[in-house]
Amino acid sequence: MTFPESNLRRKKLGQALMFGLARAISYGIVAILLLILFFIVKQGIGVVNWRFLTAMPENGMTQGGIFPAIVGTLYLVAGSMLFAFPVGVMAGIYVNEYAKEGPVKRFVKMMTNNLAGVPSIIFGLFGMALFVNELNFGASILAGSLTLGLLALPIVIRTTEEALKSVDDTFRQASYALGGSKLYTVRKVVLPIALPNILTGLILAVGRVSGETAPILFTVAAYFLPKLPGSVFDQCMALPYHLYVISTSGTQIEASRPMAYGTAFVLVVIVLIVNILATLLRNYFGKKVKMN
Amino acid sequence: MRLRRFTEPVFESLIKISGYSTGFIVLLIVIFLFKEGISFFNLSPVDEGSSLWVHNSNPVKKLTAPQIKDIFDQKITNWKALGGNDQPISLCTLDELGEAFTEEQLGAKFERLPACIDSYIDSLPGTIGFFPDKQTANALKNAQPVQVDKVSFSKFISGTEWFPTSRPAASMGVMPLLLGTLLVSFFAILFALPLGLAAAVYLAEIADERVRRILKPVIELLAGIPSVVYGFFGLVVIVPLVQSTFNLPVGETALAGSIVLAIMALPTIITVSEDALRTTPRAMKEASLALGASQWQTIRKVVVPYAASGITAAAILGIGRAIGETMAALMVTGNSAIMPRSLLQPVRTIPATIAAELGEAPFGGLHFKALFALGCILFIITLIINFLVERVSAKRVR
């Protein structure tokens, strides 16, 4: 059988066309995404200065700074990680080191996947029902941190699990051969090797938590507070919620636009820092472990 | 050594408990969500502690919540429209009584109010009255209470009106919200899937390793941008763009929502389907090339079909994200809870409704519980989506 020359050429032309299209679409998508970043940075960078980061909002949040929102987000991130990190790491250890293959392990993994897929507004509803009302914490940093912690939990579990999975089994066997118990092996051998990757997971979770709005709407976030929170039972302001309220509600939406751009810029910078940190950590320690 | 013998079991049981934590949390979410959500049904849609009354001679004894709303909005003005006698409907609340009677007639502590209502309704047999039970003491002689259908599951699901705060009776039909959610999500995926798939094919099969190493982190980075930032971007860029392109009175439309959600779904779709495309065994690709197929034909006939289940999983996952997305949808879709007719009108999604209304709903009331019922619907949709993704991915492993 022979192929006519024109058929072959058509085939080649078609391929070139489709490849070109796929490349154009890919670059187009990346361009759109970069454009969003560029837009936020361009509009926001002029607003952000030392005063913007360290002053209280003024004049109905059309002037001044976003200091209380930054502080609130820091509290919420710290509070949520205080819960999600230990529990998540231990759950990851359970799944990878302790649980035997079988229905129990499958169930635990399925539940982790389910929790990861729950929309963030459901966490908000749940946090309001359980922490704010049932446990009577009220709208508070405690309730908001726990709600955000639940949301971050599957992220920490998954990355810990992946990190532990990548630890070569020979390390474990060597420890057992020297008489190390299971927990001792996990603690002294497996965890130290997996630590950089686990920390990467922690950083990614921090990034996710610092930008979440829906879970804190009813559990902690305040529209405006004249002073910083004094205890974990106080409400606080938070960056993502601040961006939401000043860009959608109130009577001075236009006047507070610069503040909104500045806040969006700070949020984007947090995400950038988090991603860069995670990548650096992974690359730096990734090499070190391999060299050993 | 002895101490360790004591602490080790403690640590190990802590680890085990943590392992079960996610299952426990999912269970708690189900309990709390459904406890509030289910208690919504069998409540009366009429304001708590109040009742509606009609004259004894009025044959209409039963009304639905939307009918009551239409009556009090004066869209229905004759009892004939409701299957009653041909007489005009007149409304009577405490305000009307205050105008019709003097303070003396009503009594200093409104103790003669029931008698006044009685005489008012008797003089106007077409009256429908709405009074707090405290004032009527359920003791009117010339009038009888109207029975109002309780909130039922089927009415909640099939109802086409969402007026949760309307008085005297709230209408809570989930249809406009559900359709709004599905409309926005469907078009978001319709926009995102072909583009995302093309990008995934490019990254997995066509691009140089060097190019891939630059593009992939950028795409992953954008998965980390908070949804409120996308919502803000949508609000200041996409919404005005949609408004001017289609010459609309407002730019906050289902279309704007779909575009923003499509952008947000792209990273998920690209990474998941690229991973799937990469699982195609090299031998299969080489067999195809060896048979004289071009690289493009190989992609189309071998690689993409092989990864079909993974690509399906990516699409379902993307739909799930779009359905559950709260802040971006809230900020750009215009939040109007009416039955969606076109992409160019404002709609409201289920998560956006919860986010917008829960803060104002009185705790434990009808509206509050209705929002939890919405949460239950959303949660069930999520579970179905997770289940589908797991089924589709499991097929791939086999």
Image (spheres, coloured by chain):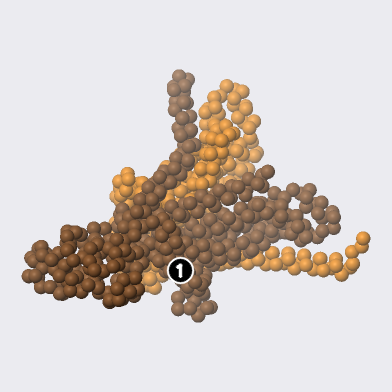
Return the x and y of residue A52 as percentages of the image width and height: 39, 63
Relative to B198, is B329 on the left or the right? left
| Residue B253 drawn above or below residue B42 | below
Relative to B363, is A163 on the left or the right? right
Which image quadrant is residue A212 in? Answer: bottom left
Q: Nearer the viewer, residue A217 or A201?
A: A217
Q: Residue furthest right?
A: A1
Q: Nearer the viewer, residue A228 or B94?
A: B94
Which image quadrant is residue A222 in? Answer: bottom left
Q: Nearer the viewer, residue A199 or A169?
A: A169
Return the x and y of residue A192 as percentages of the image width and height: 55, 35
Q: Nearer the viewer, residue A177 or A162?
A: A162
Return the x and y of residue B79 as percentages of the image width and height: 30, 73
Rendered residue at 75%/57% (across/down): B301
Rendered residue at 47%/40% (across/down): B23
Instruction: Please tell me how many numbered marks the rendered image carries.
Output: 1
Disc 1 is placed on an element classified as loop
Q: Residue furthest top?
A: B2
Rendered residue at 74%/48% (across/down): B281
Residue A199 seen in render: no
Mark 1 is surrounded, within 10 Å at the Cα level, by few (under 14), some (14 to 19) or many (20 or more) other residues, namely many
Rendered residue at 72%/50% (across/down): B280
Tell me which chain the residue with mark 1 is part of: B
Task: Return the residue at label 1.
Answer: B339
Return the x and y of residue B330 as percentages of the image width and height: 44, 64
Q: Quadrant of the C terminus of chain B?
A: top right
Chain letter for the part of the structure drawn in orange: A
The hue in which chain B appears in the rendered picture of the protein: brown
Three-letter residue code for mark 1: Met
Q: Residue furthest bottom?
A: B247
Relative to A174, is A225 on the left or the right? left
